[in-house]
Amino acid sequence: MVLSDGLANPEKKAMLVDDCCNMIETQLASKSGISGMALKAAFGALKGIKPGYIQGVVEQLLPQCFDAIDPIWNEGVQHGNPVEHMVSSRSRTADALLSVTDERVKNSSRQIVRGTYEKLRGSAKKHVEEAVPDFANVIDKYTKS
């Protein structure tokens, strides 16, 4: 089974998207200092594009993100604990996830999206690595149900 198979059920997919959006909000709320302020401002700008923009982006990116991290998750399944494996492979997991967003932004026609992403891309890996444990737990929740 590949992770994206879990997105076939529309109800399950909607709950997964909601949980991912909540995880993003929680991660963002935990940020402090100048970089935290910059992230919060950027996120606010993206949310201002249109209502539901973030949720729509998450829904669109999840299949590609799952495809990107599927090999890492499956290695963890083979080792007996995919969550722990993703967490211990957080650098590799972050690189896989960022490859998806890098490609998406490269093809974006929205200047605000491209400009915001490019300004924050340098510090993105650190922030994604910090979110890997929560993301792994969200994935685990839906692979078990």
Image (cartoon, grey):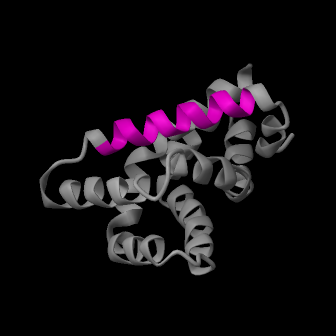
Q: Position of residue 81 (x, y in %)?
A: 63, 32
Residue 56 left/right relative to 115: right
Q: Is residue 91 above or below residue 54?
A: below
Q: Nearer the viewer, residue 100 or 13?
A: 13
> Magenta residues: mostly which secondary structure?
helix
Residue 5 left/right relative to 115: right
Residue in the image at 74% along x and 51% along y: 63
Image quarter in which the C terminus is found: top right
Residue 131 left/right relative to 77: left
Residue 14 left/right relative to 97: right
Residue 13 magenta-highlighted: yes
Residue in the image at 62% along x and 74% along y: 103
Residue in the image at 38% along x and 64% along y: 124
Residue 18 magenta-highlighted: yes
- Which residues are drawn in magenta? 12-28
Q: Is residue 114 above or below residue 49?
A: below
